[in-house]
Amino acid sequence: MVRRERGRWLDAFGFGPIETPSRVVRSWPGAELRAYGETGQVSQPSSAAALLIVPAPIKQAYIWDLAPEVSVVRRALEAGLRVYLIRWKELKRDAAEQDDGLAAYADSLIAQSLEAIGADGGRRATVPVVLVGHSLGGTLAAIFTALHPETVRALVILEAPVCFAGSAAGAFAPLAQWAPPADAIVAALGGQVPGSFLNLVCTSAAPDEFQWERWQDVALSSSDPLALWLHLRVERWTHDEFALPGRLFAEVVEYLYREDRFSRGTLNIDGRLAAPAHISVPVLAVFNPRSRIVPAVSIVPFIGALAMHTDAQALRYEGDTGVALQHVGVLVGRNAHLRLWPVILDWIRQHCQRTAER
């Protein structure tokens, strides 16, 4: 409650998000699919390639569309793409029907979103789309691509861990090793995992990235009004956290961080194996070599293995000033929008064109 009150104060001072107009295409108890551009200044024909953004289901998704100057949504619309986003919703308290795990978040909800995108484009069938995900959202998108490569044109993962063994777990490795079983944590928390608890875990695991670097960013931004303006908008976003379903939290902790099932090719989702070897579409990954939350070793070996049988590349992101948390700098950093996103969007356009030609 205290953090949300701080967020409301920042809203009152004008640091809330300035989002691109959008509409709801389909809605579920725990999520909704939004389409961008049709009601705004930028619109795309139904024949344009579709891009589906999969945010991390921990905080509000508007970090992808924070303000016009640093909006991935707007950059993608300007590149000629039809842009969709899965917006995860706040869970109802004590709602047992919303206790979903990886089968929902990494499979069925994304699959239903693709069906809705097909219908929204005037088609009745699922159409291949470009999946883009950041952090845990990128992990979910990678798992979905391994399950359904025929429905994905290309995959872009941004500071998203896909390997978790040993040092690949980064700052969370000690917690994964010594913490109680995830089911016990969920039970102690009452069935859901509050955003405040997740924030505490992250801060405890990596105080340098979640605390000290934020203060350092304030100091570096103090002489740059635009950087300080951006920093305060990101700070406002950090207060917009919500709870994770207990099952999703437990499966991420146990199946991914502790057992590394996805990287090992043993992750079973409703009777199907989600293995990196099943990914046959082009993949682009972005990593920050200085990150301890998502270290390079959690991404780069994965890309190297994929490159043996498909087009897979990795790009370095060196960080920005004014982003508060370097982990989200790839989405909102001015350098990221100036130098990195033109490369990412050009890569997407090239692969969509090749797919259309085939």
Image (cartoon, grey):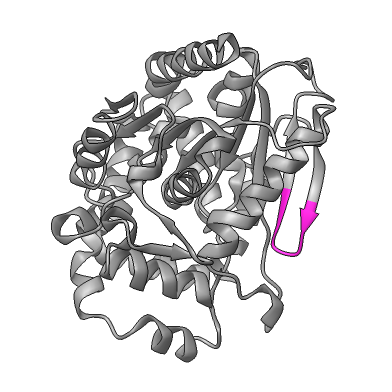
- Residue 299 position, x and y percent, is 26, 42
Q: On the picture, is 130 further left or further right than 307? A: right
Q: Nearer the viewer, residue 335 or 132?
A: 132
Horizontally, residue 110 falls left or right of residue 155, namely right
Residue 317's place in the image compared with 343, above or below, is: below
Q: Is residue 14 left or right of residue 234?
A: right
Which residues, given as a range, are shown in magenta?
A: 27-32
Q: Is residue 191 left or right of residue 184?
A: right
Instruction: Kindly identify the residue that appears in the image at 32 percent across and 39 percent down.
Output: 217
Q: Can residue 18 be seen from the camera position used here? A: no
Residue 211 within the magenta-colored segment of the rendering = no
Image: 348 above or below 20: above
Residue 107, image x and y in percent?
57, 55
Dominant secondary structure of the magenta stretch? strand
At horizontal 36% and vertical 26% (from top left) the residue drawn is 223
Measured from the top left, where is residue 199 in percent x and y?
A: 42, 65
Q: How many marks?
A: 0
Q: Residue 44, image x and y in percent?
A: 75, 16
Q: Residue placed at 39% from the left, 30% from the top?
A: 283
Q: Quadrant of the C terminus?
A: top right
Corner quadrant of residue 300: top left
Say whether residue 29 is magenta.
yes
Q: Based on the displayed image, in which of its 4 quarters is residue 72 positioned?
A: top right
Viewer-closest of 290 and 67: 290
Q: Is residue 50 visible?
A: yes
Q: Quadrant of the N terminus?
A: bottom right
Residue at far left of view: 167
Q: Residue at x 55, y 84 (%)?
A: 191
